[in-house]
Amino acid sequence: MNIVEKIIKSKANKKVSKGDYVQVPVDWAMAHDGTIVLTRKYFKQMATEKVWDREKIFVIFDHVYPAVNEKAADLQKKAREFIAEQGILKFFEGDGICHQVLLESEHIQPGDFVVGADSHTDTIGAVGCFGMGVGATDMAYIFATGRTWIRVPETIRINLRGEPSELVTAKDVFLKIAETLSCKGAIYKAIVFKSDIELPLSWRATLCNMGIEIGGKTTIFEPDQLVAKHKNSKKDLSHLQSDSDSDFDQVVEIDMEKIVPLVACPHSVDDVKPAKNVSDSIDVAFIGTCTGGRLDDLKAAADYMKGRKVKKGVRFLVCPASKKVYDDALDAGIIRKLSSSGAVILPPGCGPCLGLQLGVLAKGETAVSAANRNFLGRMGSKESRIFLASPLTIAASALTGKITSPEEL
């Protein structure tokens, strides 16, 4: 069995095979300010008064926090009332993006089954968890019962070969994967990564997070000693390794040594080109979100800037993924370096990623973004454009005012 099947089997407490529909108890459930109000609405329609376990639920305000208008404030007030009524203990405001907060949490351990009312919950696969996104109605059922259903997915093994160059990041690696498999290449399939080298947790988180962008049901790295150290776990994690004779439905080989800095062009993650072959002018350069706002990302961009100034006319926005990342970047002098180069530092959270606050695009504007989506209208006007790129490519572009490969400076 592979790691995905092993986790599902351990939760369902019975033998499973791909294609089976099974009910499983969840270890952790998560909703954020964008989904908790609908979850509350449907929960109250069910014949139950209390959540199944107030200690197993995370509620994290991150998408539009602090509230940007009266409507958002009213919705967040209702959410707070529900949280207090239910006695939910793990409530976070201003601590950062839900996925990063989960990664940082000492409670979540390798092998856990984590369900979130957000499509990018597969980020938690970076530490060897099964992470799955669901809608608000499904989450209401989970709040009531502590259980959910799943069809055991087919599995793609992605082997990451070689060592990338110093100007290539996890975002570039995933854009190569998206180009290889297409945006529909993993629909309702699990993705299991294996690398020749020990990848940092920040890389694993970005790669797992982006799995949903090619249709993946869940994305995961088999946990190793790096994960055990991060989670302060002394448990033997060997049972979470895929068996040597695992029956993967597809095996994809990605040679990281051959990857160059890449961009995904509007409006699809799989419309990928080398950054050096694109030269569109930009209005906004955005570093942040759950694919580009971790400490490694901010440090790489700050080091690359080397005190140089952002091109006049470019709005350079930097949004740390969590309060911990923000504090660590402050302590390391990274925030000062970025600010001195011309960056506007935003509060920890999702920032302008979803087009509701802190940097909405106007008609005709173009952004290069470290986020995970470049859908039409994702960051504001449906007549704007979004290029996806790594923090290094974004830093280079902020300096020149156009899409620029970090190799060029």
Image: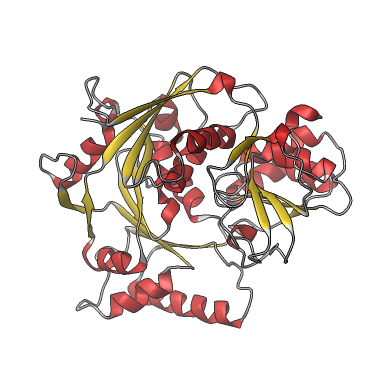
- The N terminus sits in image quarter: top left
**Figure quadrant of residue 147:** bottom left
Is 99 drawn above or below residue 78 in the view shown?
Answer: above
Residue 114 lies, in percent from the top left, at 33, 50
Quadrant of the rendering where the C terminus is positioned = top right
Left or right, residue 114 beside residue 79: left
Looking at the image, residue 54 sits to the left or right of residue 346; the answer is left
Report the front residue among 273 and 14: 273
Q: How many marks?
A: 0
Q: Where is residue 23 drawn, in percent x and y? A: 17, 54
Vertical comparison of 211 with 43: above or below: above
Against 150, is 231 above or below? above
Q: Is residue 407 left or right of residue 62?
A: right
Residue at x-position 31% and y-position 69%: 137
Give the residue displayed 68% in from the left and 64% down from the top. Answer: 360
**For this rendering, which residue is in front, 37 or 280?**
280
Specify whether residue 24 is in view: yes
Residue lying at 25% horizontally and 31% vertically, measured from the top left: 2
x, y percentage for residue 396? 77, 38
Residue 226 appears left or right of 46: right
Relative vertical location of residue 222 with respect to residue 329 in this rendering, above or below: above
Q: Position of residue 159 (x, y in %)?
A: 41, 24
Is residue 222 among the parts visible in the rendering?
A: no
Colouring style? secondary structure
Q: Please report the residue visible at 75 percent of the width from the left and 42 percent of the height from the top.
A: 403
